[in-house]
Image (cartoon, grey):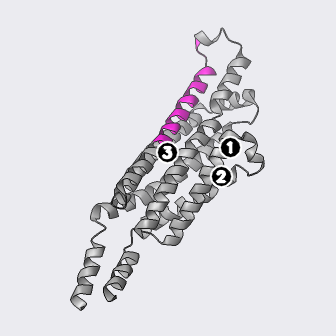
Amino acid sequence: MNSKKSEGIETTISAIDQSQHKAAKVAGFTFLFAIVILILANFGINLRLFVPGNAVETAKNILAQESLFRIGIIAHLIYGAGTIVLLTALYVILKPVYQTVALLAAFLRFVYALVWVFIALNFFTALRLIGNADYLRVFEVDRLQALAKLYLSGSDAYYVGLLFWSLASTLCSWLWFKSNYIPRAFSVFGVISSAWCVFCAIAYLIFPNFENIVGLWWFDLPMLIFELAIGFWLLFKGLSTYGMVQSNLTNQKQ
């Protein structure tokens, strides 16, 4: 009986292979790194340069600190690249649970990464519009500044991307729940917070005034907290087989 129990435990533990453990470390680091990059870009740079509702002051700020603005664009591109690294690592981890769902989640997160490339290209276009190119002199300065402000207003693109991000997070959270690789409390919170974000993104895209009912911060903040938590867990704790081992032992006793 003891030998059977030991054999059962070893078999269960070996269900998580070395590539999954390595991918978990990569995913944990990338979760945290990507969030830090995005916060620095949006709150450390964009919030400092962009003046809500004022195209003229926004243009002046960008031209006065063009290098900082360009660093912000690169940060957005790094975030997009980090999302691709993350989706690859998550696919490696979750593929054994349900390959089709893991692949779909990876594709949805890839679309989200492309949205950030689109936002970065729009920022470059805005920078060109307020530049000193000779061919732009046929247009009035205020019109160019207003058009540049339009390209800088990437909120619509973000909330389109948010829909794909939250859908991917919902699927991954469900796979986390099925796998027992992380505590189920995390997985349940992930499913709820991600599904909530899906609902909010769809509601906002259909009814823009939805933000007056639910503040924009509450769309993705719960899901962000989940991703921070799972990032720390994967980086410092890694994948666990405890739940599967306990289930294996229970079945053997029966």
Above or below, 120 against 20 in this view is above
> Which of the pair 139/166 is nearer the observer?
166
Above or below, 98 against 75 in this view is below
Look at discs 1 and 3 and give the one toward the viewer: 1
Above or below, 108 against 134 in this view is below
Q: CA distance from mark 2 to mark 1?
A: 9 Å
Look at discs 2 and 3 and give the one toward the viewer: 2
Residue depicted at x 68% and y 32%: 61
In the orientation shown, which residue stands out farthest toward the front?
Answer: 254
Mark 3, residue position:
79
Q: Are marks 2 and 1 in contact (CB under 8 Å)?
A: yes
- Evaluate whether residue 37 shows in this view: no
First in sequence: mark 2 vs mark 3 = 3
Q: CA distance from mark 2 to mark 3?
A: 20 Å
Q: CA distance from mark 1 to mark 3?
A: 24 Å
**Mark 3 element type:** helix
Check the picture and name the quadrant holding the C terminus.
bottom left
Q: Which mark is residue 219?
A: 2
| Three-letter amino acid code at the position of disc 3 | Tyr
The residue stretch that appears in magenta: 111-134
Residue 52: percent from the left, percent from the top?
74, 36
Residue 118: percent from the left, percent from the top?
52, 33
Q: Quadrant of residue 123?
A: top right
First in sequence: mark 1 vs mark 3 = 3
| Three-letter amino acid code at the position of disc 1 | Tyr
Q: Which mark is residue 43?
A: none
Disc 3 crowd, CA 10 A, few/some/many (<14, 14-19, 20+): many
The number of numbered discs placed on residues in the rendered structure image is: 3
Residue depicted at x 67% and y 28%: 150
Mark 1, residue position:
204
